[in-house]
Amino acid sequence: MWRRIRTWLSLLFCRESLQRKDESHALMNSLFHAIPDLLFELDADGVFLNIWAQSDQFLPTKKSEMIGQSIYDGLAPGAEASIRKALNEALDHGSSFGCTVCIPAPNGTCRWFELSTSRMKQEEGQRPHFLLLSRDITDHKKLENELRKREQEFRTLVENSPDTIARYDRQCRCRYVNPALAKKTEGGASALLDRTPSQVPGMPQGIELENHIRRVLETAQESEFEFLWSGKDGEEFTSLIRLTPEYGADNGVISVLAVGRDISELSRYRRKVQQMAFFDDLTSLPNRALFYDRLKQLIADSAYHQNLAGVMMIDLDRFKEVNDSLGHPAGDALLREAAVRLSACVRDYDTVARFGGDEFAILLPEIRSGKDIGTVAAKILAGFKQPFRVAGRDVFVSASIGIAVFPDDARVADDLIKQADSAMYLAKRSGRNEFRFYSRELTILASERLTMASDLRRAVNNREFELHYQPQICTLTDSIIGCEALLRWNHPEKALVSPGSFIGIAEDSGFITDISEWVLLTAFRDAVSWNTRGGHSHKIAINLSARLFQSKNFLDTVRAALSRTRCRPDWIELEITESLLLDDGELALQHLADLHRLGFAIAIDDFGTGYSALSYLARFPVDTLKIDRSFIQNIGMDRSSSELVKAMLSLARTLNIVVVAEGVETTEQLSFLKEYGCQIVQGYLLGRPVARADFESTILHA
């Protein structure tokens, strides 16, 4: 384009006759008034001879003032040198392109121009003239500088980020790695670049990462996952990887950006907590919580496949005598050896657990008959005939075994454990060192449940229920800050009946909704009565029924109770169990979010007894954790329980969650909880549950 203009202009100046010279200049003026660029005619000394511009506003000064002046006037040395170089190139070669200079503007700023220079054809003997086409690229320069600045900022962030960052093309080949990733990888960046993850030496987990990347390339959906991988010197890392698709001009995915955050420490802590929560510290066997969870899973699988399953409860005979005579270290050694012998008697997919003390349990899936379980039990008894070598001497300890079979004896985890336990005590009473099957007829239990359901119907109609209140004490002030509402059934024949005896039947028979509504209304009214008298406020903790919480009308029931009693939600703390959060996470999240918006505090009851991930603590709006009494009771007696309680308190403190310890019965337990930062305690040591009137007179007014 420029060459055509140059040729055309040269012809105009050299070949046009004097009669058409004015017409050519007019045509040139029209041409260059139609473009935003500036055109200058210069002599060999750089003096302006002609100027073509749309307006004087595009010039450093008026056109009339510039004619006859040198282009070098007022220029910085660098700009002058660039223009002289361009003119010399045009003189030698006919043209010069790509020269950029910064020229001062009248307002004191500096504007950038891109210059293209061409030597004009002249009559022989005349001094050379030049055409200089100038384009204002100031805005382009600003944008270029801004992009360069942003690119440098981004590069600085990426290069100095502790997160690992990599980019993969559509063939899953690595095109970029930041220093953090290169530093952790065996062989550095060269081991990763131009390779797919599965081709990286020494990283067998690469195929997993590659599959995730290919999925993002195919679906254009972001992905986040935990990734365990081997780095330099075989060191293992756990990273939280986030894959983000990157798009081209056609909006298609052209690459994937992988950002990894090192969560190795968190992963190790999580495994430690899980180990402490679900495995016995002494024997490394699964504990009660994990056994219970596996039993529930087995019941579901066995029911679906119509298989039999066995539950064994095992108690070591005369273990206490060994412990008392030889000491706890000897007793611990015996328990560890007992765990080894029990594990040797079962299949790889069976579960051997330690419930605590000298009590063990075994879960046997996919059995053909009770005879198979009897064979395993006999094998265990035979294995225990060999002496245990502890404290330098041989010790003989036998075992008493109780057996329950699913579904013949029970279809519920609690019942299977309870019935196997009953059979084990029968074996002990029968002389020890033997096994017994559960033998009670289920019709007796069914009859008792039917009678209980009938009594519950009468109790609902006659309002035979009452609430007892157990005080909750602040460990910092030793003052009462609230209480827990505990349901009692004032049975006309059995006196006060605790909810553990009838709640399950109430849920199965459908009475739980009426009972739960009564509990809410009664507790709300008591909260209004106690908190409108002046003085200190007292929050009432109410345990929500699983059936009520999972019902569609749950929130309507709560709102109706608030409306009828005029109770303030901040006077109430609603408790739910861990299992409720996991059974239907989305429904639980919705209900808890709605309750939080209403102003209720949310507590997780029996914390630590469920076999679940701890991630729900961050996902759900939880204000309080209630540590189950089973952990509190073993403080000072079982190191694993003590360490687990400390871990729970530490976790809650990190998440800014209040902790309530249930079942505090000794001063040793109380001192331990105070020492490790438990904010609230309740238990018989601090106050038993009492009726409303007694709670008001003896506790609130104390």
Image: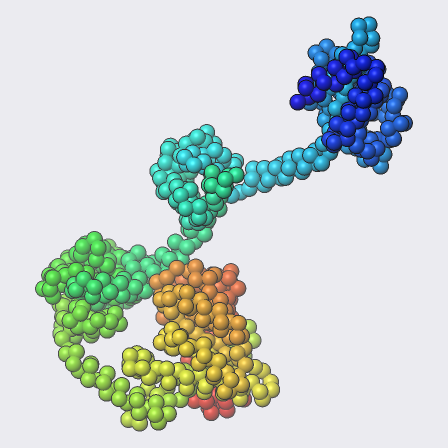
Place residue 631 in its image quadrant. Answer: bottom left
Name the one closer to the observer, 696 or 171: 171
Does 399 sit above or below residue 111?
below
Q: Position of residue 296 (x, y in %)?
A: 27, 65
Does 85 sit above or below residue 477?
above
Q: Is residue 113 left or right of residue 485?
A: right
Q: Residue at x 83, y 8 (%)?
A: 126
Q: Position of residue 659 (x, y in %)?
A: 48, 69
Q: Residue at x 39, y 71 (%)?
A: 577
Name the one closer to the observer, 316 or 572: 572
Place residue 147 in its image quadrant. Answer: top right
Q: Quadrant of the N terminus?
A: top right
Name the one closer to the observer, 64 or 22: 22
Does 49 sit above or below residue 121?
below
Does residue 260 appear anywhere in the picture? no
Q: Residue furthest front?
A: 19
Place residue 498 in its image quadrant. Answer: bottom left
Does residue 532 appear anywhere in the picture? yes
Q: Position of residue 546 (x, y in %)?
A: 37, 74
Does 236 sit above or below residue 347?
above
